[in-house]
Amino acid sequence: MALPIDVPDNTPVIIGVGQYSERVGEPGYAALSYMDLGGRALAAAIADSGASGSVAGAIDTLAAIRAFEMSRPDRVPPFGAPNNVPRAIAKRVGANPTRAILTTTGGQTNQQLVGEFAATIAAGNSHCAVIVGAEAISTVLALSAKDEKPDWSEDIPGDFEDQGFGVEELLEPALFAHGASGAIPLYALAENARRAKLRLGLAEYRREIGKLFAPFTKVAAANPHSAAPVERSAEELATITDRNRIVAEPYPRMTVARDQVNQAAAIILASAGLARALGVPQDRWVHVHAVTAATERKLSERPDLAANPASIASVAAALARASKTIGEMRYLDFYSCFAIPVFNQCDHFGLAVDDPRGLTLTGGLPFFGGAGNNYSAHAIAEAVQRVRGDRGSFALVGANGGWMSKYASGIYSTTPADWAANDRFARLPKATDSVPLARGPVETATVETYTINRVPKGDEAIVIGRSDAGERVIANADLADAATAALFEGGEPFGARLTLAQDEGGRLAGRVD
């Protein structure tokens, strides 16, 4: 295919992508900080552009994705952190952007920012924007285990926009109070709701997760940036062992996002006019055909606890804006922190788990690694490289945040995209349908979904159900009661009625009638 020569100057294009990683104990391991990893990824992206001019000097906007240890008000990075994260990364490549940003929390953030920055470039309000993030959780754990505490703090001058944590829509006080205070049990609640709809037993459903993720491990095994580059069979992923223990029903440990990574990725967007001025070869340009962002209701409010209509709407809207179908996407990467975000896309679009295109470009979060809020920057980097090598093809990246709370989708190709109308980025309206949480005393509830969270302090069964009035009820199942424990441990409590009692702390506990 001939390279484009008549792309308008204000058309946004991706000119460079970069990734950097290291694994503890391997040759060349340097125990790099978040900022050093991010700086190396950005340097790799600059080199990837092939520019003859100074890309670093042209950067007018730089957004730093929040690392996990900076993603909640109650978290403090154990080795310290720069007072100005975006400018600390910019400093490492000699950049001095006019606009420096520390983003909100969420795995959809980098994908959404591609759309926001592309629209800003198309409007003529920016000419070169960077998205960069890094995680060093594996190094933090390794050094902490040896009682080593390097100083990763830095005093960096200059202003920056702190967009805040952005976790308000992730707060689920009732679920948190009953033990579902992290991603694993919250996703497990949704996963079991899907299992109930399919009428599958625990072992059978785990085999379905294994079938979904086995092809992911093959991709991860071939990816030099993977945190766990080992190919595994569906049976191995589904079989419960000491090493592959249940972390929360129905999840074996190997099938949940792996946060122990040292990974960084960066994306550089520029106007076509600047790309030409910088001498970026046109065979490096990748066009942004659509980006859409959507926000879901809180998990406890969703009418269908297994569903994630916002993610479906985001992907469908991106395809529509690009005037493409899912069948025309040659490359796919669906966010895979757990199985259900991928299953939801497969269920809606009729995709087989062994689709010959594959459903991941990196190897997925349980195997490539769950690089905090920055995973999808790696997926976008892989998509860019795929379409560059297969000119005229299209790639779709779906990025998920929170507890299937936010979603952003992007479509990429070397085929030019017309940004004259600047309508290729959109934020979709939030769904209005919701189920209210019961506010008064509730004596009985019918189980909709559950999980048993296997934690060191003891197993805890968490339930989402409905009151007789149809309101949502959050409770614990009393595993000290033999009949209740047998029902929940057997994996089939759906539709059971629980008699509820409130403890001194205000938590509801239920036993089967």
Image (tube, helix red, strand yellow):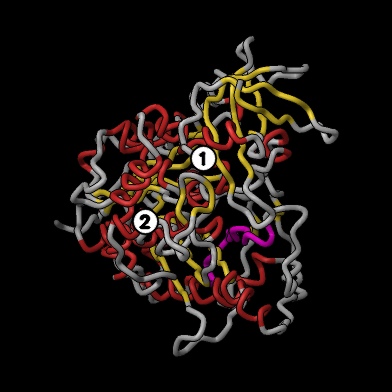
Amino acid type of the residue tagged 1 in the rendering? Glu
The image position of residue 95, as x and y in percent, is: 59, 72
Determine crowd level at label 2: few under 14, some 14-19, many 20+ residues with C-alpha closer than 10 A: some
What kind of element bears circle 1?
helix
Residue 39 colored magenta?
no
What kind of element bears circle 2?
loop
User: Which residue is most to the left?
Assistant: 1
Identify the mark at residue 489; answer none if there is no mark: 1
Amino acid type of the residue tagged 2 in the rendering? Thr
Residue at image position (59%, 47%) is: 453
Residue 94 position (above or below residue 112): below
Q: The N terminus appears in which quarter of the rendering? A: bottom left
The one of 7 and 45 positioned closer to us in this rendering = 45
Specify whether residue 118 is in view: no
Taking the image as shown, residue 184 lies to the left or right of residue 338, namely: right
Taking the image as shown, residue 378 lies to the left or right of residue 62, namely: left
Q: Which residues are magenta?
A: 56-70
Please identify, in this view, whether the residue under mark 2 or under mark 1 is nearer the observer: 1
Identify the mark at residue 239; answer none if there is no mark: 2
User: Which residue is most to the right?
Assistant: 504
Residue at image position (45%, 47%) is: 399
